[in-house]
Amino acid sequence: SSVKNKRLPPGPRGLPILGNLFMMGDKPHRDLQQLAQKYGPIMHLRFGSMPVIFVSAPEAAEQFLKTYDLVFASRPPHEGSKYICYNQQNISFSPYGSYWRNMRKMCTLELLSNLKVNSFRSMRKEELHLFIDRIQEAASARTAVDLTAKVSSLSTDISCRMVLGKKYNNDDFDEKGFEAIIREGMQIGAAFNIADYIPLFKALDLQGLKKRMKAVAKVFDDFFEKVIDEHVQSKDENRTKDFVDVMLGFMGSEESEYRVERDTIKAIILDMLVASMDTSATAIEWTLSELIKHPRVIKKVQKELENVVGMERLVEESDLEKLEYLEMVVKESFRLHPVAPLLVPHASVEDCTVNGFHIPKNSRVFINAWAIGRDPNVWTDAEKFIPERFVGSDIDLRGRDFQLIPFGSGRRGCPGMPLALTMVRLVVAQLVHCFDWELPDGMLATELDMTEEFGLVSPRAKHLLAIPTWRLKIEKRAV
Ligand code: HEM
């Protein structure tokens, strides 16, 4: 009956006006996993006046991301993206519709295709070799390397060269530095902002976010203006076309099906930088942490590398497809540390009934990929790091199997996945092939702290520090 169809999913009672907004502590993915044990895999909460749906089991996620994908393929209004990304003109936060479809198609075909990703292969190699050189120096000096910081700058350098055509020093940007300001943008983006949920609060700006957003937006805009001007003036036809070149090529072009304007380019550059820098770096840092924490596993990866690559040379991208055990390690790491624990918020464009529950139009929907990866109903020893669980299993992480969805699934699934998986496997393989790793100050592997920090992207709370020892049979990396 229609009355039964109007039954909202269960959930905790909230306060008047604010609803459940203040139930979110500093680890919402964990709080929500706890709540789901009481209320079930589809929960309804209220943030201000907005219905918010939290999904925390594979079958339920499949309903939202596959069965009713079209209903839930939009994004909610988002103050952060409104101020920083030219009125939500980035792909990640643009609402479902022709603009998003068009820009997503452009990114998938022109910026993130296998062909385009491969065109940056030698650039990645060059950056990775510089990176290995620096770590080799630490190995000679027997000093600990801040792997979190080092991997983060490697990822920044590679992203900048791909998107903007060159590396930028921190001081090219703003007194705070490039990585810091991107991170600030992401923090603002991930905060549960009251203004997103209670329109009245927009004007009040109680959390002071709007002020921060406007300040960050100004820094980005000045920088991107400079970048675009430099590209317009540059006459070098021979270099590999970076993302800005590709998009400038579409701007004002009569033949192009993509309607690209200056603000579009700026919004998409930022989207590509934000989407590629911290995500890949975080996935790499978690995988390395698990490897260092599990000496048995790291030895097994090294053995595989010895067989496939040998001890006389570095890992090449073309080796990656032969590294089956590494693939399992990466899956297992994404299962426990899905990088974007709640994916990116979805929004519904019409009323929908899911598992008998009424999900109102304009609901925000969060998929708790973190809880799904640790769901004891689908994973045995769910909290343990055991890559062997994937032996003889065809569970994949690309969005087909809903018990493992670090990249989401469906229309809004991550378009950068091929690039991301290349980066993660390549950097992890290289670091583990070239070096043995030891924790500093005699810390035991079992003592390594694995606490995470919540955000749109959830990195380690504490930087990963380790002492490298060179293990290849060649003196230096021979290139
Ligand atoms: C380990 C690395 C990465 C992870 C774990 C990751 C994960 C995700 C997730 C969970 C989403 C949201 C899916 C959803 O809403 O259901 C997403 C969206 C997106 N990702 Fe990634 N991503 C990674 C790397 C990248 C890279 C390298 C790029 C491109 C340079 C990229 C570009 C995007 C874009 C543009 C979206 C928005 C898609 C849309 O809203 O239509 N990502 N990613």
Image: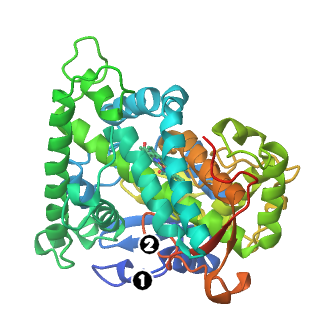
Residue at figure coordinates x 25%, y 36% from the top left? 265
Residue at figure coordinates x 29%, y 67% from the top left? 184
Residue 179, numbered label? none
Residue at figure coordinates x 47%, y 38% from the top left? 123
Q: Residue furthest left?
A: 203
Give the image location of residue 326, x and y in percent: 74, 53
For disc 2, the marked residue is 45
Q: Is residue 360 left or right of residue 467?
A: left
- Disc 2 packing (10 Å; few <14; some 14–19; many ≥20): many
For disc 1, the marked residue is 23
**Mark 1 vs mark 2, CA separation in Å:** 10 Å
Q: Is residue 332 left or right of residue 364?
A: right
Q: Nearer the viewer, residue 45 or 310?
A: 310
Q: Of marks 1 and 2, which one's residue comes earlier in the chain?
A: 1
Residue 298 falls in which quadrant of the image?
A: bottom right
Q: Nearer the viewer, residue 317 or 69?
A: 317
Relative height, residue 315 to residue 56 (above, below): above
Asked if the residue under mark 2 is in contact with the one under mark 1, i.e. CB atoms within 8 Å, the reply is yes
Q: Residue furthest front?
A: 475
Q: Nearer the viewer, residue 411 or 299?
A: 299
Give the image location of residue 175, x and y in percent: 19, 66
In which quadrant will I find the N terminus? bottom right
Q: Is residue 108 at all visible to an observer of this figure?
A: yes
Give the image location of residue 110, x and y in percent: 42, 27
Dot 1: element: helix
